[in-house]
Amino acid sequence: MPLLAIVYFSISGTTEQLAHAIARGATGMAEIGLCRIAGDDIVSGRFRNERLLETIDRAGAVAFGSPTYMGGPTAQFKAFADASSDRWSQQRWADKIAGGFTTGACANGDQLHTLTYFSILATQHGMLWCGLDIPGGEDPAGRNRLGSQLGLATHLIDGALPESDLVTAEYLGRRLARIAGRHS
């Protein structure tokens, strides 16, 4: 079974809920590596968690996740991305499957920019980007509620993630695991 590394930063717990839903979706199809970026991982402005980076080295698929803050991923996620530059120069993550997930305060809270950032990070590393293949607004189960094909975009309603967004996250986990399994 391939390893799915779910690399994320979460402040309020919402992005972490999505990470765990992605893991549930991939259960039985992939080994799961939940890789939460923590404040302690950043020392003097630099991300320093070699073990987390080594988990990605071993993975067949990676899901990148961060809340969208001020139109992009959080500074903590960006510190992780910047620290991946040594692996970029060696193309150590090339040919891995990658996808992304984010949440914002509003339905159009510029989550697309965060997903675009993730896809560019992945392609710089030579990874193969995997978006959602669920037409927004057309799915009988209500998945892909906001209609983002690039990855999972969500926002809170009355302070909580809608169940349909968690179901979409599970679907993304299955999709990443399935494609990684075929690709390995």
Image (cartoon, rainbow, N blue to C red):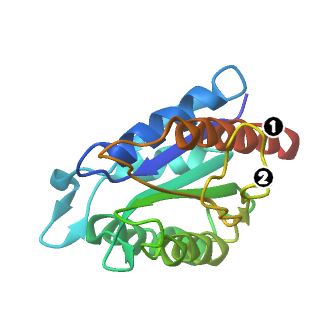
Q: CA distance from mark 2 to mark 1?
A: 20 Å
Check disc 1 and report the residue beneath it. 181
Q: In what quadrant of the picture does the N terminus appear?
A: top right
Query: Quick one: SS at disc 1?
Result: helix
- Amino acid of disc 1: Gly
Give the amino acid at mark 2.
Answer: Ile
Residue at image x 44%, y 53%?
Answer: 53
**In terms of image quadrants, where is residue 70?**
bottom left
Where the C terminus falls, by quadrant?
top right
Instruction: Point out which mark residue 134 bears.
Output: 2
Q: Residue drawn at (72%, 56%), measured in percent from left and top?
A: 137
Q: Give residue 130's position: percent from left, percent from top.
A: 73, 58
Compared to 81, does 157 lie above or below? Answer: above
Camera-side residue of 52 and 86: 52
> x, y percentage for residue 145?
62, 53
- For label 2, the crowd category at 10 Å Cα-Cα, with few meaning under 14, some 14 to 19 and many 20 or more, is some
- Could you say which is closer to the camera, residue 143 or residue 70? 143
Position of 19 with respect to 40 (left or right) is: right
Provide residue 133's location: percent of width, then percent of height: 80, 54
